[in-house]
Amino acid sequence: MIQVRDTNFAEAKIFIPEVYRDQRGYFKETFSTAKYAAVGLHDVWLQDSVSRSRRNVIRGLHYDLRMAKLVQVLVGRIFDVIVDVRPESPTFRRWQGFELSEDNHWQLYVPRGFAHGFLALSQDVIVHYKMSALYDPASERVLSWRDPAVGITWPLEGEPILSPKDASA
């Protein structure tokens, strides 16, 4: 059974898969078309990607208006953020942050029209993304992680580590 939690945005959700634990560790299904469709997730996933980061890395905020994402942490912990970038939306420029970790098993559904980024909170972080469109650099957009019109409160300890693309957004 998959638990579903609402967010501040009607379209975005937290999914928590069932986790089977024993003396060996744990087992979980990270995705099943039938099980996720039964709880309302009907996207067709075309690409999976994985990133590895270290503490204080900020990745994002990235978006592609063609693409929804399902994000989960395989190793470590992150502060994961979504921002509504739909100009016609009543929640335009609002954001919400979530702690995703290997321990809580939360999966964040990032709908089309939302920017997404995260801050690595632990020394080693591995994040898995399912994407509903193939990555296309020509379609990707970047919103500054410190855009004053959005005003994200990042739980940073020290200076962030950014890619050149994210630093110049």
Image (spheres, rainbow, N blue to C red):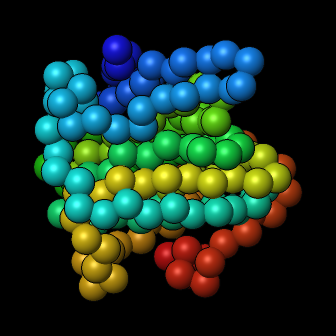
- Asked where in the image residue 143 lies, by quadrant, the reply is bottom left
Residue 70 in view in this figure = yes
Q: Nearer the viewer, residue 122 or 151?
A: 122
- Asked where in the image residue 53 lies, by quadrant, the reply is bottom right
For the N terminus, the image quarter is: top left
Give the answer, above or below, for where 25 lies relative to 123: above
Give the answer, above or below, for where 145 lies relative to 79: below
Residue 87 position, x and y percent, is: 20, 54
The answer to whether residue 96 is left or right of residue 163 is left
The answer to whether residue 91 is left or right of residue 82 is left
- Which residue appears at 38% of the width and 27% of the height? 15
Give the answer, above or below, for where 40 lies relative to 45: above
Residue 122 position, x and y percent, is: 78, 47
Residue 154 position, x and y percent, is: 66, 46
Q: Nearer the viewer, residue 41 or 113?
A: 41
**Count of residue discs:** 0
